Image (cartoon, grey):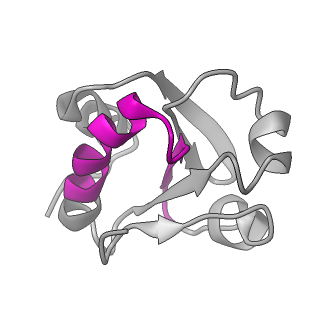
Amino acid sequence: MAANVLDFTDANWQSEVLDSEVPVVVDFWAPWCAPCRTLAPTIEKLAGEFVGKVKIGKMNTDENQETPGGLRISAIPTVLIFQGGKEVDRLVGVTAESKFKASLEKLGVSAS
């Protein structure tokens, strides 16, 4: 993973996502998923642009099944955006960078 992209797991979900002081973008993916690989460069770019303002990371749904199941993730890639421990947006499929930025701007966060 790119330097600014975090690795979210079932084990660190509470501390890294739900208890985060800043908004969190979570890309649910799997290594075998071609659309997930298509979306990866966009996630990496956003992670670089929003460093220090937003936590951006990925959760491998093959290795972590408890959290995605509890969040009703039924297709990947699915990207959830959290603020204050609550889901505030859900983007399913390969999504344009502009949609992620618009969603974060609604939360009052802009790229550096």
- The residue lying toward the viewer, choosing from 20 and 62, is 62
Asked if the magenta segment contains residue 27, the reply would be: yes
Q: Quadrant of residue 3?
A: bottom left
Residue 26 belongs to the span the image colors magenta: yes
Q: Is residue 38 above or below residue 93?
A: below
Identify the residue at the far left of this view: 112
In this picture, residue 10 sits left or right of residue 93: right
Coordinates of residue 7 in the picture (x, y in percent)? 54, 68
At a point 37% along the width and 29% down the height, the residue shown is 35
Nearest the eye: 74 or 99: 74
Up/down of 40 relative to 55, above or below: above
Q: Quadrant of the N terminus?
A: bottom left
Q: Which quadrant holds the C terminus?
A: bottom left
Q: Can you name the residue that lies furthest to the front here?
A: 32
Residue 45 vs 105, above or below: the answer is below
| x 48%, y 22%: residue | 92
70 or 75: which is nearer to us?
75
Count of labels in the image = 0
Q: Is residue 95 left or right of residue 87?
A: left
Q: Write the residue at 61% across / 67% down.
A: 20
- Point out residue 48 in the picture as x, y percentages from the top left corner: 21, 66
Viewer-proximal residue among 16 and 108? 16
Q: Quadrant of residue 45?
A: bottom left
* Residue 58 x/y as whole percent: 51, 55
Horizontal arrangement in the rendering, residue 36 relative to residue 43 (left or right): right
Above or below: residue 27 compared with residue 38: below
Residue visible at 40% across and 42% down in the picture:
107
Residue 24: x and y, percent? 51, 55
Q: Which residues are magenta?
A: 22-46
